[in-house]
Amino acid sequence: MSVIVNGEIHSLSEPQTLAALLCALAPAPPFAVARNEEFIPRATYEECRLSTGDRIDIVHPTVGG
Amino acid sequence: MEDQLTLYGHSFSSRLILGTARYESPMQLADAIRRANPAMLTVSLRRQLPGKKEAGQAFWNLLRETGKTILPNTAGCHSVHEAVTTACMARELFETNLLKLEVIGDEMNLQPDPFALVDATVELIKLGFQVFPYCTEDWVLCRRLMDAGCEVLMPWAAPIGTGQGPRNPTALQELRKRAPHIPLIVDAGLGIPSHACQVMEWGFDGVLLNTAVSRALDPVRMAGAFAAAVAAGRDAYRAGPMPVQEFAVPSTPDVGRPFTHCVDFIQHSYQAEEKRP
């Protein structure tokens, strides 16, 4: 299966949770995550099971006006 | 007693909110923050890109070192759904309920979408956010935002990043008169310190700046100039400007003006001459 992470296709060998995906990607903290344009609270990463085609956004602080 | 700006229960001695974008370097940003000594800093969130993972962390550390209150924005959102999701991510990331809500309705002038702005505000206030809506000076829109529960409004002066200054001074001043109690922060479109001073003289409670500082030739110096202008405008408003007069009024007292006796004497002599038989 594959998911899209920040606009890039990412292949997964088996279905997994968001927590496992983040463990593999190791984004630098602090970050926040949305799946299919829905916010996923940090406390629910373990229970968030990914499906093929899911669009994952991992965001971090940046400058803004 | 010190003149404090209170927004959602947070009190500030400064009335300037400073954006953190478009500086040449993090060091220049940090210097500008020190010089402006703003009440709050606006920030945003964007995708973490491969190879630039640490950039967010470095910026986060810079923000924390300033000790300033952080105001995350929803810049670039075009729908209620995008704005709400972005707001939720920002809340978790920056650990604050404060939110500068931007819902853009037009790409050319980055004007707020008033309909989506109100809908997003209603939803976000239900979720416990303290919303700072980036809006226009339209009175009915502002009323809807107040009805939704906003405790501050942020009308634009001109489109974002243009530096044009207040495009519609009459409507802005009318808004101030019709909404005398809610804090009003002029956000977007200011270019030079006199613009900031002007809106503060009209009784606005603060200004939000970014490009006017960061794209100046010397952003650090300009940060200081804006801070001084905001303070001067606020002082002038509190001092109560004089009423404008139609005709000239001499400022120097007329009583005791020299040479007046000459005129009186000459006139008196002529009159005496005329009366002589």
Image: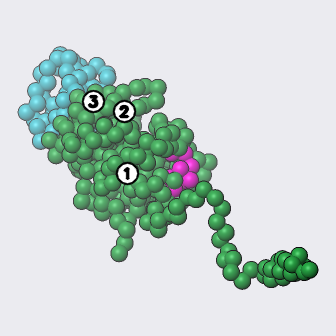
Chain colours: A cyan, B green
Residue that label 1 marks:
B177
Residue that label 2 marks:
B112
Mark closest to the chain's N terminus, 3 or 1: 3
Q: Are marks 2 and 1 on the same chain?
A: yes
Q: Secondary structure at mark 1?
A: helix
Position of B233 compared to B119: left or right? right
Under mark 2, the amino acid is: Pro
Q: Is residue A34 visible?
A: no
* Picture quarter with the C terminus of chain B: bottom right
Are dots 2 and 3 in contact, CB under 8 Å? no
- In the rendered structure, find residue B116 and report the number of the disc placed on it: 3
Q: Residues within 10 Å of mark 1 (few under 14, many from 20)?
A: few
At 33% from the left and 30% from the top, the residue drawn is: B113
Q: Residues within 10 Å of mark 2 (few under 14, many from 20)?
A: many
Is residue B192 a member of the stretch shown in magenta? yes
Under mark 1, the amino acid is: Lys
Distance of mark 2 from mark 3, alpha carbons? 8 Å
Task: Specify the segment rendered in magenta.
Answer: B189-197
Q: Quadrant of residue B187?
A: top left
Q: Is residue B78 visible?
A: yes
Observer-side mark, 3 or 1, equals: 1
- Residue B102 in the image: state x and y as whole percent: 33, 37
Distance of mark 2 from mark 1, alpha carbons? 22 Å
Q: Residue furthest left?
A: A47
* Picture quarter with the N terminus of chain B: bottom left
Q: Are marks 3 and 1 on the same chain?
A: yes
